[in-house]
Amino acid sequence: MAALGGVLALFLALASKRLYVFEDPRIEQVEEMLPHSNCGACGTAGCRNFAEQVVAGSIEPARCTVNPPQQNKSIASLLGIDLGNVEKRIARLACSGGNNVAKSSANYVGHSTCRSAAVISGGGRSCVWGCLGLGDCSHVCDFGAIFMNRQGLPEVDPAKCTACGDCVDICPKQLFSLEPVSRQLWVACKNQADPSASENSCEVSCTACGRCVMDAAPGLIKLERNLAVIDYSKNAMADRRAIERCPTGAIVWLDGQRADKGRAARKIIRIQPLPATAEA
């Protein structure tokens, strides 16, 4: 038995040397300099995988949007590579229908999550495309970048948002998307109903009037399914002219945390929730 044990030990020792796979020690160093959030905002499976790809040269340190910029610079310095230039992306919400402007056809009572409400007659909102306001996106955000305002609508803090995509995945209405900060012209609505019906369900919905199409640079905006759609391949041509005549303020110009509406947009001073009204 002793001889057999010795033979097996020798065999394992030889096999370990034969099958040994070298791992660059810098991977461990880079991983220690990462936030260990494993959020996936960089497009990799996690911080370990990100470290492996940075060391291999297939991804740039700046792709980690959770790390402080100085930490990413330290990684680039350690590896002797370029930091990279990755435009910051943040989560954008394609809805501005808070409970003070968006009507409800019923009061939802049940499990307080948007996903639960969505399967019960759409959560009671008259606009079937609109935000349900129960805060799934806020709860799932590990970075505290989303909070619910007094009208029950999510607001994103650009300074805290890491573009991890958790809010995109959790929203049952697919209202969130990750957008480069350079995209300042934004349609804060997804209502594709007939214009008269959409305005009847929400005071700030897009009514497909086409004024933004006429006022914007040629080809920048078009109407699809009763909704203004921006062609971001022409983003360099975007400016504030497109928002000025929008009667509902559905198309806005984003400046940091502020969403500016045009001069023609009706002024909403109501802050209290609209009562639920039964629909015929």
Image (tube, rainbow, N blue to C red):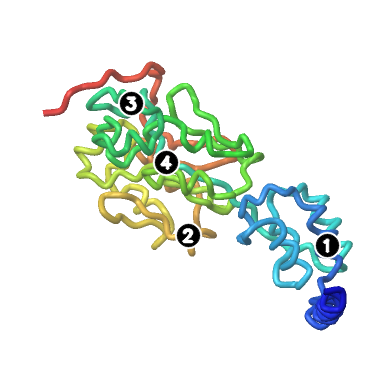
In screen coordinates, is 86 left or right of 179? right
State the residue at coordinates (42%, 48%). 242
Seen as rendered, the residue at the extreme front is 1
Dot placed on the residue nearer the N-terminal end, 2 or 3: 3
What distance separates the C-alpha of mark 2 from that of mark 3?
39 Å
- Nearer the camera: disc 2 or disc 3: 3
5 vs 71: above or below = below
The tag on residue 110 is: 3
Q: Which residue is labeled 2 in the image?
A: 232
- Nearer the camera: disc 1 or disc 3: 3
Dot placed on the residue nearer the N-terminal end, 4 or 2: 2
The residue under label 4 is which amino acid type?
Glu
What distance separates the C-alpha of mark 1 from that of mark 3?
50 Å
- Can I make out residue 183 in this image? yes
In screen coordinates, is 169 left or right of 105? right
Mark 4 neighbour class, 10 Å CA radius: few under 14, some 14 to 19, many 20 or more = many
52 vs 184: above or below = below
- Of 38 and 137, the residue lying toward us: 38
109 vs 252: above or below = above
State the residue at coordinates (50%, 54%). 238
